[in-house]
């Protein structure tokens, strides 16, 4: 759940405060449920200085399907060129004033879809990882029945050796 929340926040036009938003969400939802904050904090890095312009441009273009707007890709990219906190604030202000509604709508659509995809993928990945770790911790006698049958068959055909390679090394007795 933490990764899905982090992905949702990463896809929204909240560059610069995304980690704070994940922490704020965790505090607000704590009475209802908990999630892995570290997974959420790591997931927000999907939007970073290298991906923010293409990601937000895609979100903006998707939003223009619902709310027409015209701004060139060069003007859009120029919004994200800033140095220091004061320029960051003016960039964020320009972002919401110049392209706000289409970007926000497109971002909410993309964030919803991406987080809905992330949750079951992460759940499946974690379940598979837990299953694999559980199998590795089990002693050989407690593993799957197929493995037990294979081990028993190996012992019978190899003269008691559990490892087929060891069986090959044992001398053949007449």
Image (cartoon, helix red, strand yellow):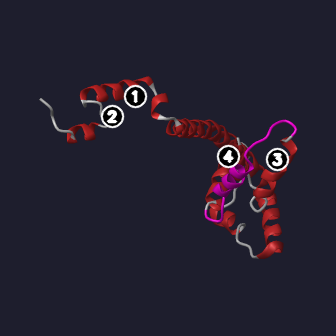
In the displayed structure image, the side of residue 45 where residue 83 appears, left or right:
right
CA distance for labels 3 and 1:
46 Å
| Tag 4 and tag 2, C-beta contact below 8 Å | no
Task: Choose between 69 and 134: the one closer to the eye.
Answer: 134
Looking at the image, is mark 3 or mark 4 earlier in the sequence? Answer: 4
Instruction: Give above or below for 18 relative to 148.
Output: below
> Element at badge 4?
helix
- The magenta stretch spans residue 34: yes
- The stretch of residues the image draws in magenta is 31-50
Q: Which residue is drawn at 81% across and 72% down?
A: 85
Looking at the image, is mark 1 or mark 4 earlier in the sequence? Answer: 4
Residue assigned mark 4 = 3
Instruction: Give above or below for 166 relative to 13.
Output: above
CA distance for labels 3 and 2:
54 Å
CA distance for labels 1 and 2:
12 Å
Residue 161 picture location, percent across and down: 30, 34
Instruction: Give above or below for 138 relative to 90.
Output: above
Residue assigned mark 3 = 25
| Tag 3 and tag 2, C-beta contact below 8 Å | no
Residue assigned mark 1 = 147
> Element at badge 2?
loop
Closest to the camera, between mark 4 and mark 2, is 2
Residue assigned mark 2 = 162
Label annotation for residue 27: none
């Amino acid at each position: 759940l933490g990764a899905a929340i982090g992905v949702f926040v990463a896809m929204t036009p909240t560059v610069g405060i995304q980690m704070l938003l994940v922490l704020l969400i965790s505090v607000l939802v704590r009475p209802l449920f908990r999630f892995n904050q570290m997974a959420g904090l790591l997931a927000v890095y999907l939007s970073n200085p290298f991906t923010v312009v293409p990601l937000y441009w895609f979100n903006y273009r998707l939003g223009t399907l619902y709310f027409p707007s015209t701004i060139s890709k060069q003007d859009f990219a120029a919004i994200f060129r800033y140095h220091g906190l004061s320029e960051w604030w003016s960039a964020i202000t320009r972002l919401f004033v110049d392209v706000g509604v289409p970007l926000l709508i497109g971002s909410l659509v993309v964030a919803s879809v991406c987080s809905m995809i992330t949750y079951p993928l992460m759940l499946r990945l974690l379940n598979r990882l837990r299953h694999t770790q559980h199998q590795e911790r089990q002693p050989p006698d407690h593993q799957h029945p197929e493995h037990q049958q294979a081990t028993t068959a190996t012992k019978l055909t190899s003269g008691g050796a559990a490892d087929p390679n060891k069986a090959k090394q044992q001398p053949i007795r007449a």
